[in-house]
Amino acid sequence: MKFYELSPEKRRDQLVQEGWLTTQDAALLAGTHSLPEVTGARLIENAIGEFPLPLGVARNLLVNGQLHQVPIADEEPSVIAAASNGARLATANGGVRTHVAAHRVVAEVVLTNLTDLVQARQTILAHQTDIQKVIAVAHPSMIQRGGGLDQLTVESLGAQFLKIRLTLDPQQAMGANYANTVAEAVAAAVTSWVDGDVLVSILTNAPTELVTAEVSLEPASLATKAVSGDVIAKKIVQLSELAFVDAERAVTHNKGILNGIIGAVLATGNDTRAVAASIGAFACASGRYQPLSRWYMDQGHLVGHLQLPLPMGAVGGAIGALPMAQVVRRLGGYQNLAIMQQVIAALGLVQNLAAMRALAGPGIQAGHMKLQANALAIAAGATETELSMLVNALRQGSMDLKHAQQYLTTIRLNKKVGQSKDENRD
Ligand code: MEV
């Protein structure tokens, strides 16, 4: 049998036999089940287990007057701490206001080897009603749900290509499968009207609808122990201006925004690669890499404004198959796709706020390393009872794996000495 035809258990056995996995690795993979093994095996090819990540929640983020608990699946210790911090600040200042444009997905069918591009364009445009029919037949239930073709354009790209651009309404779905089904059906029909060949028929992951999020903050509310709110607000504006002129800074600035967004998108069962590709393209849309947010002072308040694409769905894809995605949908208060997109954009903005406030105040390492100590202690092999002692030792000493292992050895030795003293006392 081929590898992809085996059960997950047999795939693990094979990887052990081939020397890629130890038996302990295989046992770990076999023991981590929050998904029924059959679900994992059906969702992806060559499944051998699960890769669990902690799921946390950024508490009480006020978005358009509604409180949300935002679930985030993430491995970086400081992400949820920063998100919660940002959410607390934004909520105390009246919350985040957001807006999202109507949800659309775009498919492209590109033809080549045409004898006359101009003539072919006219022919295709004359078949608009037929194209509508092809789309309806390809996916009738989308039309019944109120979706379907929104706009059709045909443009030549250089002397070689003719592109049919289909803007589609996929309702609550992300729309990737819908766009691809429609694109292939339209491609098949078009070849009977014009000469030439279909080169590609697929959705584009380029940005479609944009989500905006805005927050306005009283500078005093931003004060840290050592720095006044006015100074923090002023520095945040300068950091924002810097990101517009220093692309290297802009990438890191945007990474801070993505810190919240990617983990929140992952937790909903959506395709994080589609979101990352689209956001990356949007950041470069002007021809120069730009920050996704802008911070400025307005009438004594610090205002933050974020705009970005979030190509997601509330149904379809893996979402319905992943039980945890359903929990996340309920916990997040994501009653529909528009709310999901807006809350996640608001999260990106407050995540950005928390990062900038830390940069403008104490710097990020103090808080970051405090949280990193837990990850180091676990990596060094501390048991539950040793964990807090080792974390304390790390915070007072050197924060690296080598020292974590040394401190752990000392903790264990001290414990042994303590035990033998107790025994002698008896
Ligand atoms: C760290 O994960 C994210 C930050 O670097 C973002 C930023 O610099 O704005 C703190």
Image (tube, rainbow, N blue to C red):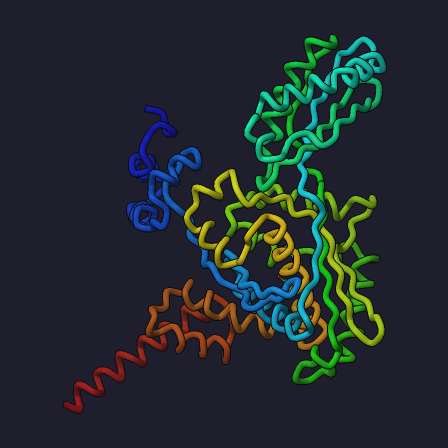
Where in the figure is residue 151, as x and y percent of width and height? Answer: 74, 30
Q: Nearer the viewer, residue 42 or 21?
A: 42
On screen, residue 107 above or below 409: above
Q: Nearer the viewer, residue 268 or 25?
A: 268
Q: Residue at x 71, y 54 (%)?
A: 99
Residue 263 visible at all: no
Ligand 1 shown in quarter: bottom right
Where in the figure is residue 410, as x and y percent of width and height? Answer: 36, 76
Where in the figure is residue 402, as x and y percent of width and height? Answer: 46, 67
Q: Nearer the viewer, residue 215 or 148?
A: 148
State the quadrant of the N terminus. Answer: top left
Q: Nearer the viewer, residue 337 or 157?
A: 337
Q: Residue at x 75, y 78 (%)?
A: 219
Q: Residue at x 55, y 45 (%)?
A: 314
Q: Residue at x 70, y 79 (%)?
A: 221
Residue projecting furthest to the left: 426
Residue 288 visible at all: yes
